[in-house]
Image: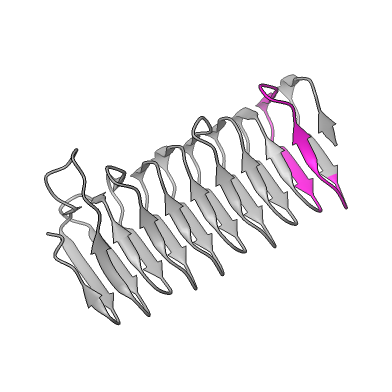
Amino acid sequence: ISQNANVTLTGKGDINYTATAGDIDMLADTRTSTQTGDIRYTAGKNIHSETLNTQAGDIALTAGENILAGKDITTALGNINLVATAGSIETEADAPISATEGNITLTAATNISQNANVTLTGKGDINYTANTGDIAQNANTAADQGNVNYTATAGNIDMLADTRTSTQTGDITYTAGTNIAISHLNTADSKKIVLAANQGNISVVENTLYDSHIETGTLVASAKKGIGSFL
């Protein structure tokens, strides 16, 4: 499916695109939006999305191979769920993901490359899972009333220098099959940060925007090979 123009639903209703054995490709700067309803893109192979927006509903992208988010994905009241069942997920630098109330979930068979901010301003959790590859966090992640979880089951989690993960009322958990490299993590004093590098090291990357790498009430860190000085 080649979406070369905007799709807008001004009332109640869902928008669904399905390419059972192929790709879904949105032309640059096109937009899909609905006032009250869900947006679903399902492809047997790859999905390239541009602007997706609903005021009250879920947004779901499910690709048999890879997902490339080229522009913003936003919902006011609903969940955002990106799944690459046999491939990777990449968000470009001008493709922030945001929700007011609901969960934000990215799940990839291989790698996740986050190049734009992910923000949840109300209740809900933010979850990233890369089953066999690495997670590259190259932008900020912020939750207001929920937890933030990064999991690279068999790979590394690498934060770019000066990136930040924060939550106001929840916990932060980073779990990697090998190594974790931290820039800046922040929770409230009553909450905790958990870091687990199951077969590798926990280290820090230099940053210029923050005085410390970890700000939290309770820190739990475990690594098979070593833990750097990051307080």
Rendering quarter of residue 193: bottom left
Left or right of 95, for residue 209: left
Q: x and y percent of residue 22 in the render?
A: 85, 48
- The residue sitting at 45% across, 64% down in the picture is 151
Left or right of 226, for residue 29: right
Left or right of 94, for residue 227: left
Q: Which residues are magenta?
A: 19-44
Q: Colour scheme used in the picture?
A: one colour
Image height of 134 relative to 69, above or below:
below
Q: x and y percent of residue 214 in the render?
A: 18, 55
Image height of 45 relative to 131, above or below:
above
Residue 10 among those drawn in magenta:
no
Residue 21 among those drawn in magenta:
yes
- The residue sitting at 75% across, 48% down in the picture is 46
Q: Quadrant of the C terminus?
A: bottom left
- The residue sitting at 59% across, 63% down in the picture is 110
Q: Nearer the viewer, residue 7 or 202?
A: 202
